[in-house]
Image: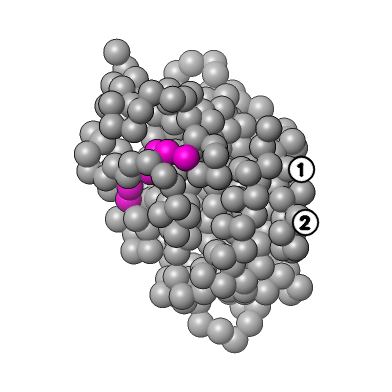
Amino acid sequence: MSRSADLARLIRERAGAEPVSHGLILGSGLGHLAAGVEGVAIDYADLPGFPHAGVSGHNPKLAVGTLEGVRVAVFGGRAHYYESGQADAMRLPLEVLKALGADRLIVTNAAGSLRPGMPPGSLMMLGDHINFSGLNPLIGEASDARFVPMTQAHDPAMRTRLRTAAEAEGVDLAEGVYAWYSGPSFETPAEIRAIRTLGADAVGMSTVAEVILARFLGLKVAAISVITNMAAGMSDEKISHEHTRAMAPLGAGKLERVLRRYLRDLD
Ligand code: HPA
């Protein structure tokens, strides 16, 4: 038995055998949604091989149960590359998600905005991304499955449903290109000018590795950023992790409404 199959069995023993439909990964300061799941919450520490996910503002628990009538697995904490130097730190959790039966993943994050008209508190769905980190979670993967196509990696049908859910909730949902910067230091203003020129609309330290892993595993994936600040050099505000955490709730309520509506309206 593989490690992910063993962990999936352990989770089913606690959360019931009904297959999961969607996985959700919650970003910094966006953990509230996990509390709404009717089911069980399992500490990552009880899931051997799960990352420590030790960044403040994350809640390292896996909630498995029902949200808006849909069977979900909600990852309250994610591992970032910058914590361990491992770009594939979320591989096992996503393999477990797949072993639980899921075929779709929604990723959320906190991000800096590169668009003057997209201020803190805005939501931006990722239409595409730029891997500005030079890293890849599939380095070392031996099978030919590693050559994952990344055209339309962000699933068009899921994005349409998310857009429809946002409209139904009266929430503005921008769409744009997210650039993955490894962190943990924030970007310099020159780096932000560079990635603006390259076509990025938002910047953050997560998500892209998870999208690549999801596509590798055959999961459909969509991602939404909550804008917590203007990127470096674009405003006078100081950029910090505390600021990210403090600003995340500005957009988190809207994000929760969009995600709940999306789930409720699935058929
Ligand atoms: N840069 C990178 N990651 C972030 C930012 C940012 O400006 N804001 C929130 N996460």
Q: Nearer the viewer, residue 265 or 2?
A: 265
What kind of colouring is applied to the model shown? one colour
Asked whether residue 128 appears in the rendered view, the answer is no
Q: Which quadrant of the figure contains the C terminus?
A: top right
How far across and how far down the image is residue 236, in percent? 59, 86
How far across and how far down the image is residue 229, in percent? 58, 73
Residue at 66% over, 62% down: 123
User: Which residue is farthest top?
Assistant: 1
Callout 2: SS: helix
Give the amino acid at mark 2: Glu
Would you say residue 62 sits in the magenta stretch?
yes
Q: Nearer the viewer, residue 237 or 49?
A: 49
How far across and how far down the image is residue 82, in percent? 39, 53
Q: Which quadrant of the figure contains the N terminus?
A: top left
Q: Check contact, mark 2 vs mark 1: CB within 8 A.
A: no
Which residue is disc 1 drawn over?
Answer: 160
Would you say residue 155 sits in the magenta stretch?
no
Describe residue 241's horizontal placement relative to residue 122 as left or right. left
Give the amino acid at mark 1: Thr
Residue range corresponding to the magenta coloring: 60-66
Number of numbered discs on residues: 2
**Which comes sooner in the sequence, label 2 or label 1?**
1
Which residue is disc 2 drawn over?
Answer: 167
Badge 1: residue crowd in 10 Å (few <14, some 14–19, many ≥20): few
Callout 1: SS: helix
Measure how far apart labels 2 and 1 are at the Cα level.
Answer: 11 Å
Badge 2: residue crowd in 10 Å (few <14, some 14–19, many ≥20): some
Residue at 51% over, 44% down: 67
The main secondary structure of the magenta stretch is: strand
Q: Image height check: is 237 above or below 52?
A: below
Asked whether residue 149 appears in the rendered view, the answer is yes
